[in-house]
Structures are given as structure tokens and as C-alpha cells.
Image: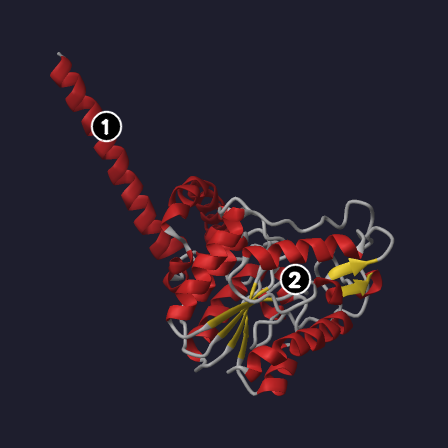
Amino acid sequence: MYKKFVKTILAFCLTILAILALFITFFFHTVTPQYTMIYTAAMIDKAARLNSVEGPRIVLIGNSNLAFGIDSSLIEEAYGMPVVNMGMHGGFGNPFDEQVCRLNVHEGDIYVIAHHTYADDDTIQNPELVWMTIEDHKELYPLIRPQDYSNMARAFPRYAFKATVRWLRQTITGREVPVDGAEGFFARSAFNEYGDDAYPRDEVLYTFDETSIQMPEVNDTCTERLNALNAWLEERGARMVVAGYPIGDGEYTPEREAYDAFEAELREALDCPVISRFTDYMYPYNLFYDSNLHLTTEGARLRTEQLIKDLEPVIEQQ
């Protein structure tokens, strides 16, 4: 009786696994991709540029403060080096953003890290969003570290359900189903060849208040990971530096001394150079577009000019 029960359970489990394997095969061969036009799908184009442009290159690493805050053409013009702006989305989290450093390293590359905080829990913050980004684009799979697998696996059913429903609606109706993040400044089409969001941003859509600005923090989890990444890049003849991110400067902004203290703590914790004074990246509130990290077109120009100044000693050492 007991053996029969065990065989029944085993057969049931094997059947479930077989069904699951069939669904996954069908899903990745038929349903995907479903989100090729959303904002984060620009990662496909950024990775393609990173893999195709010959080095040495200047590679910008971070979240959307880079996507909405850099004019890469100005950096390329200043130093004659190809620039790849890999800045993408805060929902990915620092570890995912940093993982792009490992895609295609060239000797002489300069990797510029520009996080808005240096304290994290070493996880992908929004794994469902990552699934919507990588889908069946195998060239992006190396961005997922082995320690991220369980987190990504838990998020897969929700992503797969939404994508399958969208596929069914389009298959049945024969019409494109709209998706958030596929038009205007928050779309894949807004990015230029460098990886900058080049959508015109002349007006101000964001209002700062007392909750807008949080002081950046430093923890060992983040800095130890960055130090390991720095050592890995150095072994391959590349350099890593840390630069500033845009900070709204106004009535709700903490005192500059607080940023100086943060900067000192960060310099002490990191093995790589911190090339910026973070207070040099403070800009009036009217230079921010739709969030406390996204700059207007003019703000992006000013921030880029400051980064060019900060990079000068690094370039001179090339």
C-alpha cells in the first residue's frame, strides 16, 4: 500500500514537471517576446552597443539617473572614446546594474559607477521587471547571477501569466495590446544610439517636497561587491571609478556637510577612486524633469559637463 502511494505521488510529480517543461518550451518559442517596446527593453540595444563597439570605451553604470542625465556625445567629443550609457532602471537594483560590467570587457575600458545610494541587500529589486526586460534575449541572461536564480524563479509565474494573457488577446483579436512604458519619454524608442534617453525634456513635471530626497547610505554589502568587481575589472586591464549622481538643491535638501560625510565614508570603503565631489552634482529643482533623479535636457548637459571635468584625471592616466 505504501509503495503504491509513493509511486502515485512520484508519477503525479513527474507529470507536473513534464507539463511545466512543455509550457516553458511553448512559452519561450511562441509567446515571447511580449515587451520589446517598453522602456527597459532599451537594455537590448545598450547591450548590443556594448558588445559591438571596439574599446577602449567609457561605460556608464547605474540606474535611470544616467539614462535621463547624460549627453554621451559630449563625453565622446571631449575624449575621443566611444561611450556606452548602460543606465537603466532603479527597479533592477545595484547588483543587476553592476553585472553589465561583465558582458564584454576590453583592456583600457573605463567603467563609471553612478549609483544614488551605496547601501543595498545584494538582490534584484523587481525580478518581474527584469523578466519583462530579458524575456528570450539570451544575450542578457549573463546579467542574472546564480544567487539571483531563486528570486527570478519566484517572479516567473506572474510574468509568464501576464505575457501569455497579452499574447492570447493579441492572437484572438489580431490587434496590438497597449502596454505601459511604450511611448513618449518612457519608451525604448526614446533612447539614442549611445543609450541616452534623448526625448526632449524642457518642461518640469516633478515637484519636490519633504519626502523627495533621501540621504545616500553606505553598507558593506554594496562596497564589498564593488571592490570585488573592481578587482575583477583590473585583472582584465579595465578601470572602475565612482562618480556623482544628480541631487536636487533647494529647501528640502540636506546640508552639504551631510553629503561630504557620506562621500568620505564611501572613499574609505572603496578600493577604486571616487572621482566626484557629490556636492558638485547639486542642481536647482527646476532642472529635474519627472522625478528626483531625472534631469531636464539642460540639466543633463550641465551634469555631463561636470562628469567630463571629473573624468579628466582618469583619462590622463590612460
Of tags 1 and 2, the one toward the viewer is 2
Q: Residues within 10 Å of mark 1 (few under 14, many from 20)?
A: few
Answer left or right for 277 relative to 1. right
User: Dividing the picture into quarters, in which one does residue 67 lie?
Assistant: bottom right
Q: Which residue is mark 2?
A: 65
Answer left or right for 174 relative to 142. right
Q: How many marks?
A: 2
Answer left or right for 140 relative to 216. left
On screen, residue 286 above or below 195: above
User: Dividing the picture into quarters, in which one does residue 15 lie?
Assistant: top left
Badge 1 or badge 2: first in the primary sequence: 1
- Dot 1 lies on which element? helix
Q: Residue 284, how many percent across, how many down?
A: 83, 63
What's the amino acid at mark 2?
Answer: Asn
Which quadrant holds the N terminus? top left
Q: Residue at x 36, y 49 (%)?
A: 146
Q: Residue 76, how many percent across, how many down?
A: 59, 83
CB within 8 Å, label 1 to label 2:
no
Q: Which residue is mark 1?
A: 12
What's the amino acid at mark 1?
Answer: Phe
Q: Residue at x 76, y 49 (%)?
A: 212
- Dot 2 lies on which element? helix
Q: Residue 255, how many percent across, how many down?
A: 81, 53
On screen, residue 100 above or below 155: below
Query: Most extreme residue toward the top, as rendered?
Result: 1
